[in-house]
Image (cartoon, helix red, strand yellow):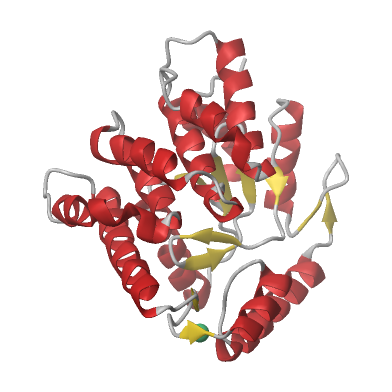
């Protein structure tokens, strides 16, 4: 987290990297590449991920792949490597010359587990994309990996901005609708800033964040973490930290809690867990956890 940049410049560069990734303008590739040379792991990571996002918008794949491969293999921070490796995956067959190096990484016990896992996933995806190019295959389902027809592709992209076969489309659609309805029904508690949340604990967290001017998203949207879709309670984009309030105590809830917590960990995500017993000391807890992530509250 420690960066030699001035906090003001750092914050500006973080915002720019996020914005450029989101905008989907392939002509901004060079600006993102420049951002990867800034002396901050956080900016490198965001810029690498932004470069990945430009892949589908037709960014120059040779330039993108060259820089992403450098970051993937020589990045200073394992999270930068992980993000670069993931971004590389988006360029598919264009990354073919790096498959062997990625497989070597996946087998290297000196590397973090999440870096190795990302390397394996990306190596496999690139190899598959390369063989698809040879076989004239256009699209594959993100969920079950079968080849998807043009019609299936269009329908799914329109609904989810993601490519699913018809069978997975129906399943994803149902899961998502049930989940979102459940979340909507449960959102009955209003925080001071008007955000509707699901419990008293979440309300306290929301109000603490607002009081300390930390911008957050209280998200009803799914987010992809690894291959899973989960819905984090709070996400703070500027510092890339998640907060989950684990409010229930039933065995079923605990099972899914452990699974989600593991997922965050495997993916190297920065998660703060809050439990009901923490609510009486919420201020001290959030302060100390956030300071671990380099975010000091005055
Ligand atoms: Zn499928």
* Residue 78 appears in view: no
Instruction: Identify whether 90 is placed above or below 292.
Output: below
Could you tell me residue 41's position as x and y percent?
40, 27
At x 86%, y 40%, the residue is: 192
Could you tell me residue 238's position as x and y percent?
61, 32
| Along the line of sight, the residue nearer the viewer: 139 or 170 | 139
Left or right of residue 147: residue 213: right
Labels in figure, total: 0
| Along the line of sight, the residue nearer the viewer: 142 or 194 | 142
| Along the line of sight, the residue nearer the viewer: 236 or 29 | 29
Left or right of residue 43: residue 282: right
Could you tell me residue 243's position as x and y percent?
57, 46
At x 41%, y 64%, the residue is: 258
Residue extending farthest to the bottom is 167
Residue 133 location, quadrant: bottom left
At x 64%, y 28%, the residue is: 15
| Along the line of sight, the residue nearer the viewer: 122 or 270 | 122
Instruction: Identify whether 213 is placed above or below 132.
Output: above
Residue 204 location, quadrant: top right
At x 60%, y 55%, the residue is: 232
Tell me the quarter of the image containing the N terminus: top left
Could you tell me residue 275's position as x and y percent?
54, 51
Instruction: Identify whether 186 is placed above or below 79.
Output: below
* Residue 73 appears in view: yes
């Amino acid at each position: 987290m420690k960066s030699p940049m001035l906090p003001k410049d750092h914050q500006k560069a973080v915002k720019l990297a996020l914005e450029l990734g989101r905008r989907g303008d392939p002509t901004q590739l060079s600006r993102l590449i420049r951002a990867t040379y800034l002396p901050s792991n956080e900016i490198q990571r965001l810029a690498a991920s932004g470069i990945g996002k430009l892949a589908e918008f037709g960014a120059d794949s040779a330039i993108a792949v060259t820089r992403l491969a450098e970051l993937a293999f020589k990045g200073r921070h394992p999270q930068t490597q992980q993000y670069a490796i993931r971004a590389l995956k988006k360029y598919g067959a264009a990354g073919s010359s790096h498959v062997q190096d990625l497989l070597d990484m996946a087998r290297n016990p000196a590397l973090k587990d999440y870096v190795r896992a990302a390397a394996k996933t990306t190596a496999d995806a690139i190899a598959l994309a390369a063989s698809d190019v040879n076989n004239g295959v256009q699209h594959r389902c993100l969920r079950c990996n079968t080849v998807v027809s043009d019609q299936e592709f269009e329908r799914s992209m329109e609904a989810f901005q993601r490519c699913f076969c018809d069978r997975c489309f129906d399943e994803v659609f149902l899961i998502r609708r049930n989940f979102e309805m459940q979340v909507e029904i449960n959102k009955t508690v209003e925080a001071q800033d008007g955000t509707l949340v699901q419990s008293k604990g979440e309300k306290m967290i929301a109000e603490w964040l607002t009081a300390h001017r930390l911008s957050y998203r209280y998200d009803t949207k799914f987010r992809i973490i690894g291959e899973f879709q989960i819905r984090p309670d709070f996400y703070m984009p500027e510092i890339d930290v998640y907060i989950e309030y684990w409010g229930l105590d039933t065995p079923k809830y605990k099972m899914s809690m452990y699974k989600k917590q593991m997922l965050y960990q495997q993916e190297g995500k920065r998660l703060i867990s809050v439990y009901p017993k923490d609510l009486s000391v919420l201020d001290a807890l959030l302060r100390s956890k956030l300071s671990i992530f380099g975010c000091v509250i005055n």
